[in-house]
Image (tube, grey):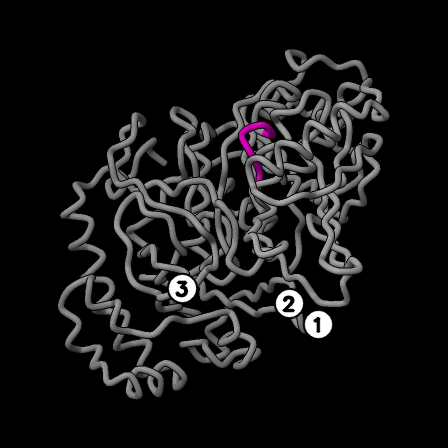
């Protein structure tokens, strides 16, 4: 694969023409194949054959995750079952996963998009890739695996967990690139420190991080701890998995959207009205070229903005800003809207704290209470109250509500098998949904 594909450097007007051509081919196919869409569009009084401009897309209703649940498992598929080559799924709040499917052409697209993002992140043919994403229904492991092989890399399919084995394989096989969740990357940093292995002794040069929110403070810690340049890869299982967008290693300032295949809009979270470049709102995506599960105006719930100015790397694809939060993980604390990522951003401003944290919500006598549990760095006395009081003060001054802070020993917060820390523990007797990316 060349460092750039032609569509990555298209003039914006030429790219929009390609998007419109693909959109006009997509909509009639979806209408004819998916009864849910056909009925909804007829009810809205929209003739998709008359769509003549990208702006006309705003006349169509949004597709939401509830639509996938309501038509479980295959109700939104646009191809017969025998044409589905692979099925993946993401965790669901009702006990059943959200099912997504791929034709052979979709898997080819999946691999190509991931390969493109790996190139953005610094990977090249012939390099070794240590893949620490989980394999299985989750799209991350097999998605990065297929993209790396498409690029011509040597893949080590380690999957998640078993940290000692991960460290040993990195030391022995000497990979150039690692794909891993940000939280687990920090776990590996700690494991190498405990072994007495300095960052400059680690073979890794690039880290491709995704599947959960992370911050610039985490990037700095991972860069320093593993001796890498870490970049973000973004995706959702419903759209395709990882590969919807990725950061370039040159700028590391926003994730380039693969707009030739994924048409992105930013809309007002309250009204759904379209917003312009640079304005922050909900990311809505239409899959222009997917076959098995094409989605039209899919409401991702992710809060971000788009920058359409050319990047220093030479790509003209729009860049997504770091996800500011999700519409479904927003907490209302004493009348104040709070995203967990706002707390995460403040951790880097307090010396002695790691990026591993959890918000614990409890029902108080008169109002809800929130406690921030955060791990101290190795070698730091967690009983030093200055750290807790400093963070509590920053939260009050920056976010506008009071939270108590508990500083824990390193590694004290529970992790999932993939190394993730659950960011919200709601003990109020009401469910709080925090959706993972990818």
Q: How many marks?
A: 3
Q: Are marks 1 and 2 in contact (CB under 8 Å)?
A: yes
Residue 204 is situated, as x and y percent measured from the top left of the image, at 60, 22
Nearer to us in this view, 169 or 217: 217
Identify the residue shown where x is 24% and y is 62%: 22
Apparent side of residue 35 relative to residue 93 in the rendered image (left or right): left
Q: Which residues are magenta?
A: 214-218
For the stretch drawn in magenta, what is the main secondary structure? helix
Q: Name the quadrant containing residue 1.
A: top left
N-term-proximal mark, 3 vs 1: 1
Q: Are marks 3 and 2 in contact (CB under 8 Å)?
A: no
Q: Which residue is mark 2?
A: 92
Report how far apart the C-alphas of labels 3 and 2 lie in the structure.
24 Å
Q: Which residue is mark 3?
A: 270
Q: Quick one: which residue is furthest to the front in this view?
A: 366
**Label ID, residue 95:** 1
Identify the residue shown where x is 39% and y is 68%: 294
- Above/below status of 189 relative to 412: above
| Mark 1: few/some/many CA within 10 Å (<14, 14-19, 20+) | few
Q: Nearer the viewer, mark 3 or mark 1?
A: 3
Identify the residue shown where x is 41% and y is 39%: 255
Nearer to us in this view, 127 or 340: 340
Nearer to us in this view, 298 or 15: 298
Q: Is residue 217 magenta?
A: yes
Label 2, secondary structure: give it.
Answer: loop
Residue 81 is situated, as x and y percent measured from the top left of the image, at 50, 78
Q: Name the quadrant containing residue 392.
A: top right
Report how far apart the C-alphas of labels 1 and 2 lie in the structure.
6 Å
């Amino acid at each position: 694969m060349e460092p750039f594909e032609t569509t990555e450097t298209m003039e914006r007007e030429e790219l929009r023409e390609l998007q419109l051509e693909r959109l006009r081919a997509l909509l009639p196919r979806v209408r004819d194949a998916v009864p849910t869409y056909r009925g909804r569009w007829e009810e809205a009084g929209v003739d998709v054959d008359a769509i003549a401009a990208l702006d006309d897309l705003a006349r169509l209703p949004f597709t939401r995750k509830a639509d996938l649940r309501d038509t479980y498992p295959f109700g939104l598929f646009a191809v017969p079952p025998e044409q589905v080559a692979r099925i993946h799924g993401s965790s669901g709040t009702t006990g059943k996963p959200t099912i997504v499917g791929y034709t052979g052409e979709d898997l080819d697209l999946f691999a190509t998009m991931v390969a493109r993002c790996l190139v953005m992140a610094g990977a090249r043919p012939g390099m070794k890739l240590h893949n620490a994403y989980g394999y299985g229904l989750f799209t991350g492991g097999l998605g990065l695996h297929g993209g790396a092989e498409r690029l011509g890399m040597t893949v080590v399919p380690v999957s998640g967990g078993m940290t000692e084995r991960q460290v040993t394989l990195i030391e022995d096989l000497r990979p150039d690139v690692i794909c891993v969740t940000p939280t687990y990357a920090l776990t590996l940093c700690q494991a190498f420190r405990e072994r007495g292995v300095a960052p400059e002794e680690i073979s890794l040069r690039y880290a491709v991080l995704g599947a959960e929110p992370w911050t610039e403070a985490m990037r700095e810690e991972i860069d320093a701890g593993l001796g890498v340049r870490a970049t973000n890869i973004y995706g959702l299982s419903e759209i395709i998995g990882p590969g919807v967008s990725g950061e370039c290693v040159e700028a590391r300032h926003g994730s380039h959207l693969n707009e030739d295949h994924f048409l992105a809009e930013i809309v007002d979270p309250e009204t759904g009205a379209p917003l312009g470049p640079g304005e922050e709102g909900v990311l809505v995506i239409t899959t222009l070229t997917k076959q098995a599960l094409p989605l039209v105006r899919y409401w991702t719930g992710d809060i971000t903005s788009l920058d359409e100015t050319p990047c220093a790397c030479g790509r003209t694809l729009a860049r997504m800003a770091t996800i500011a939060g999700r519409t479904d993980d927003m907490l209302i604390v004493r009348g104040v809207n709070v995203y967990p990522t706002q707390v995460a951003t403040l951790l880097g401003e307090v010396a002695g704290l790691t990026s591993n944290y959890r918000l614990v919500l409890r029902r108080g006598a008169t109002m809800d209470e929130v406690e921030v549990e955060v791990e101290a760095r190795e070698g730091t006395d967690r009983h030093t109250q200055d750290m807790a009081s400093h963070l509590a003060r920053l939260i009050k001054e920056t976010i506008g509500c009071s939270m108590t802070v508990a500083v824990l020993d390193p590694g004290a917060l529970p992790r999932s098998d993939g190394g993730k820390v659950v960011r919200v523990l709601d003990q109020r007797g009401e469910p709080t949904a925090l959706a993972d990316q990818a």
